[in-house]
Amino acid sequence: MIKRQIAGLVGCSIAAFCAVATVAHAAETNAQFDQWFEVQTNTHSWSADFIQTRQLKVLNQPLVSTGKVWVTPGEFRWELGQPVQTIVLRQPDQLLIIYPRLKQAEKYPLGAVPTGPIKDALALLDATLPRDRATMEKNFRLLSATETNALLQMTLQPRSDSARKFISDIVIGFHTNDFTIAATEMKFADGSSLRNDFTNVVMNQPIDPAQFEAKLPPDYTVVEPLK
C-alpha cells in the first residue's frame, strides 16, 4: 500500500500512442538521447500542467485528474486535483504526502529507509527524469525506443529485482524538436498503470522557494508510515 501511494502519485503507465509507431534507428536514437540528456543537464528548473490517468484492473473506466508540478534539482512539488486533493512534496531529506481535505500528512524520511522495495519505489520518483545517461543506465535497462509524430518514447525496466516485483517498466516521452518532457508512464506488476501527460512546460524560470516548503497548519495530523 505504501509503495503504491508513493509511486502512484507521481508515476506513470505505458501509453498507446499510435498504431503507426516505428522503432527508431539505433544511431539516430542514440543521438536524440544524447541531446535530451544534454538538455536535462542544463535544466535548472521546470514547471508544467499535467493530466494524470490511472488504469486499475478493478475499474472499467480510468480515473483522470489534472494537476501542476514544479521541479528543481533534488526538490519537486506535485499538486493533484482542482481543488487540490493531494500534494506530494519532495525535499532533500524527506518526502511529504499531504491531504488538505483530510488535514493529514505522511512523512517519509529519505535517509532512514531500509534497502528493499519501498526504497526502490522512493528512488523511482527521481529516476523518471534522469539528469545524465550514465545514471539512467545504472538504474534501468533500455528495452525499446519508438518515435511517433516527433515524440520519442524510451521504455525502461528497473534493474533492481525488488523494484520489478512492484513496477514492470517505465516510459519517458519527450518532444524531439525541443527535447522537453511530454509524458511519464508506469506499468505496475499487477497490471494496473498510471500516466502523466504534460502541457505548458516552462523551462529554467525562477520558482519561488516557498513552493518546496512544508507549512502545515497546527490542526494537521502527521504520521510516519515507515515507523
Image: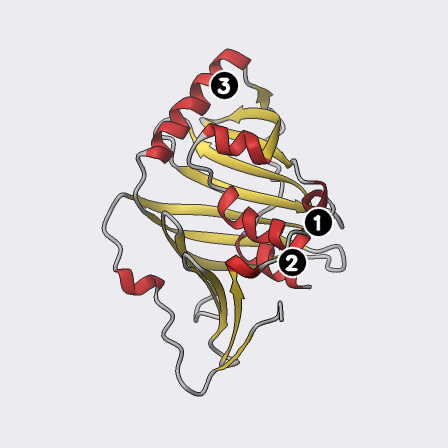
Q: Residue at x 36, y 26 (%)?
A: 177
Residue receiving disc 2:
3
Residue receiving disc 1:
166
Residue receiving disc 3:
29
Q: What amino acid is found at the position of numbered circle 2 in the picture?
A: Lys
CB atoms at circles 2 and 3 under 8 Å apart? no
Q: Mark 1 to mark 3: distance in Å? A: 28 Å
Kindly report which numbered mark, 1 or 3, lies closer to the viewer in this rendering.
1
Kindly report which numbered mark, 2 or 3, lies closer to the viewer in this rendering.
2
The quarter holding residue 137 reads top right
The mark that comes first in sequence, 1 or 3, is 3
Q: Determine the secondary structure under disc 3.
A: helix
For this view, does 134 lie left or right of residue 189?
left
User: From what the image shows, is residue 7 above or below residue 15?
Assistant: below
Q: What amino acid is found at the position of numbered circle 3 in the picture?
A: Thr
Say which of 190 and 43 sits in front. 43
